[in-house]
Image: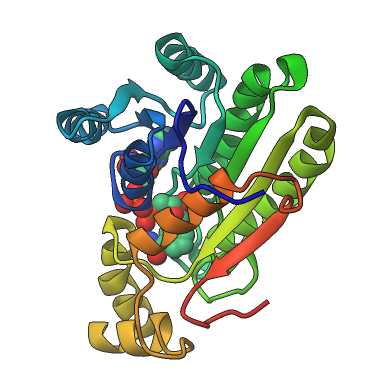
Amino acid sequence: MTMKLNLENKTALVTGAASGIGKEIAETFATAGASVGICDLNIEGAKATADSIVASGGKAVAVAMDVTSEESVNAATDQVTDAFGPLDILISNAGIQIVNPIQDYDFGDWKKMIAIHLDGGFLTTKAALRTMYPGDRGGVIIYMGSVHSHEASPLKSAYVAAKHGLLGLARVVAKEGGSHNVRSHVICPGFVRTPLVDKQIPEQAKELGISEEKVIKEVMLGETVDGEFTTTADIANLALFLSAFPTAALTGQSIVASHGWYMN
Ligand code: NAD
């Protein structure tokens, strides 16, 4: 079967789609023909993403969603399926970063990190499966992991634990979903220059006692083969490939895009 990188007649829901990686995935999917639910806590940002997609001829709807709330996730998913029909693709991408050494890591911050990354993955999956399982119509669920799904870095206990956890969730979804034609993957980016990363540069410089330039060159890109950031377009293209891939030969995988920082 020749593969077409096109998502005509597909409905996709992208969380964290007001900014950064999620926004680029939503735009790329709309260009490939999908109808896209732009879900985010930041509804103004989500509206801006949806408006720019619609202005360029695509199909999108902005919906407020807090991925840590079951009620909000279910209500927002219903709004997307009311607009565009049952989901074919879920991109569970919303995320934040809080850096601190463990001895100073506030327990409330830990719980917030786990809630957004792991509870969010679970709740959006459960809501998506309600629309993918009936009639075994199936779908593709992609979690935004990280090189930190495989590697550790100082100051990132909650992030590394949560991103490792997504590998487990994705593998169970692949096994349980197989007989319903549901596939799942984890995309694991290296550092991508988004607001999430821009915020960390001065924070890490302060915690580690080094310059911001050193944080970029040594901490973030020191292990890459070419000193380059991964881009939002790199990740959106990878998400498109995995979403359009036609068979379950690819399921339960983690795909790392990090300029060789982590090789698996
Ligand atoms: P970003 O800050 O640009 O975007 C994250 C979006 O998530 C924001 O629009 C924010 O409003 C939204 N969000 C936060 N909490 C939410 C909640 N409770 N409910 C709904 N939406 C919420 O960040 P980004 O860099 O694009 O990150 C997207 C994902 O990619 C995250 O899961 C992040 O961990 C992962 N990631 C990023 C990088 C990187 O270098 N930027 C690397 C690896 C993985």
Is 31 drawn above or below residue 104 in the view shown?
above
> Which residue lies most toward the left here?
55
Tell whether 131 sits left or right of 260: right
- State the quadrant of the C terminus: bottom right
Q: Residue at x 61, y 48 (%)?
A: 245
Tell whether 157 sits left or right of 176: left
Q: Residue at x 70, y 57 (%)?
A: 253
Residue 35, quarter of picture? top left
What x and y, as percent, mark residue 188?
55, 63
> Can residue 118 be seen from the camera position used here?
no
Tell me, what colour scheme is on the image? rainbow
> Which residue lies most toward the front here?
2
Tell whether 73 sits left or right of 209: right
What x and y, as percent, mark residue 61?
31, 22
> Can residue 23 be seen from the camera position used here?
yes
Q: Residue at x 65, y 50 (%)?
A: 185
Is 184 drawn above or below residue 73 in the view shown?
below
